[in-house]
Amino acid sequence: MDKFDLCVIGGGPSGYAATIRALDFGKRVLLIEKNRVGGAGVFNGALSSKTLWEMSESYKITRTLNNGFAVYDSELNYKDVIGEMRKAMHEKYAQLKEQIDYFCRNGQLTFVEGTGKLLTKNTVVVETKDGKSLEYFAENIALAVGSRPRKIPNLPIDERTVVTSDGIGSFENFPKSIVILGAGVIGTEFATIFSNFGRTKVYMIDKAERILPFEDADVANMVARNLEQNGVTIHHESNFEEMKIVNGKVEYTISLKDGKKETYTVEKALISIGRVPNVENMGLKEVGIALDSRGHAEDEDTVTSIPNIYAIGDFTADIALVNIAEMEGRYAVERMFGTPDFEMTYNNISTIMFLNPEVAGVGMNETTAKKNGIAYRVSSMKYKYVNRAIAMRKTDGYFKILVSDDDEMKILGMRVLGNHASSTIGYVALLIKQGLGIRELADLIHPHPSITEGIQECARMLLGKSIMKPEVFSQHISCYRVTSEGKIDNLYYKGKVGEKQQLTIGLN
């Protein structure tokens, strides 16, 4: 039986990162993958959907009539669009596979295509694609089992008419209409994509008061407003009752807040209600790995209930993002073979939602702060006061920074909605990790004109030294304090140039 220092089951973002990091330590590594390395981070997930979003944004821009030019006609073919998406996926897959092949040739890595299963805490059996059964011994095991779209029992998901995100590529053409069940990030992103292309009437079923319920109301409401302006119909506060395929089309019924029921007919349906970890037939319970009610591992900083077995990526109950998966994979390996280069922390997680407009966030939002009874100060400014946004003719958006309610004013979180939003969050994430406040941010010299100047103005505003004043542009610029009890006060800064600024709080 071959013996390894580490066996990684699953070659998605977390498993791949763990594998490569273990090679840095000079360890002998076995990587098992049943499909293709890259997982949902490349195929039918992050890279594929973001490629579609980029293409839809580019197409939408070509149809814009207020930038001094107009495009009156254009060809749009769904198969060509999906073909370009697949090119992007295979481009990344080729990079990952080339590196795997290199380390396999050098004898540093063993890569087995097949389905892995735990026999003991140190023994793994692999059922290969050609029907062989192979056993391996490993001192440590990292479970990067990944996840798949959640499904509802009795729903006719055939991945052609009623699809999950896995079936988007199966359409022959742009559907004339589609209903999306689920108003989280994935569902809202696909609503944005299809509405951007302008060939599909989009409906969304949202059982909550607003889409993106985990985000602040101002963020969700702005995204919803833009979707509706782009032709999307959102069934707010509607309960999903039934869905069936009738004569090749989708018939769905919802019940409204007042108790009435409505039935609609569309060409396609997308089910986007979250994801579940791939834990079936893995031997997890037999070996003794503790799982929570949703099938995630009960882990402590990636270590499961069995000390030499680690859970990473979508197998943990933490946020299912590619950057988090890679962080967990690298961290787990550093715990196995050395001292981690960093502490495992989730308070400076950077996220991007590819919507209309683009939404970028890092750290805490107001919803979380209020839920946990945290007092904070916040400043907000719309894009229309930033020169770069004016130059781009893209002023639909805003900045919002949360800081601690004390003299240090440490950065708790930030949200940016608008063009180039994703380029604004990296250094703010670093400041949060370092426990620094907004003075460092306010004193940076930002390139001009750039979108990040809006963040600098928000930081300056909290210090009472912004160039654009909230008392002048109160409809678009704000600076306020929220107590731990949820009381909101406006913040006004008074003082003369050259003198120490004094903070006064006026009741709103």
Image: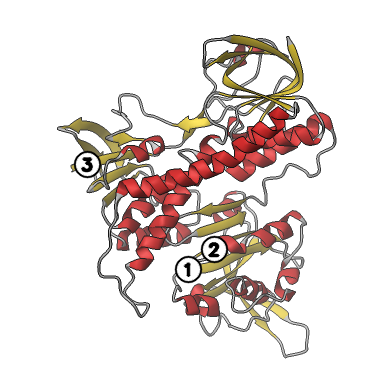
Q: Earlier in the sequence, mark 3 or mark 1?
A: 3
- Residue mark closest to the camera, 1 vs 2: 2
Distance between the alpha carbons at the discs numbered 3 and 1: 33 Å
In the figure, is residue 141 to the left or right of 339? left
Q: Position of residue 142 (x, y in %)?
A: 68, 26
Give the structural element (helix, strand or loop) at label 1.
Answer: loop
Do we see residue 339 in this rendering? yes
Q: From where the camera sits, is residue 184 visible? A: no
- Residue 453 picture location, percent across and down: 62, 75
Residue 267, label in figure:
3
Q: Is residue 32 above or below residue 349?
A: above
| CA–CA distance in space, label 1 to label 2 | 9 Å
- Residue projecting furthest to the right: 338
Q: CA distance from mark 3 to mark 2?
A: 34 Å
Q: Nearer the viewer, residue 174 or 467?
A: 174
- Residue underneath mark 1: 397
Q: Which residue is rendered at x = 78% and y = 87% of the image?
A: 499
* Residue 136, numbered circle: none
Question: Which quadrant is the N terminus positioned in?
Answer: top right
Query: Which amino acid type is shown beneath numbered disc 1?
Result: Gly
Residues at badges 3 and 2 in contact (C-beta under 8 Å)?
no
Badge 3 amino acid: Glu
Residue position for label 2: 421
In the image, residue 133 sits, relative to residue 52, either above or below, namely: above
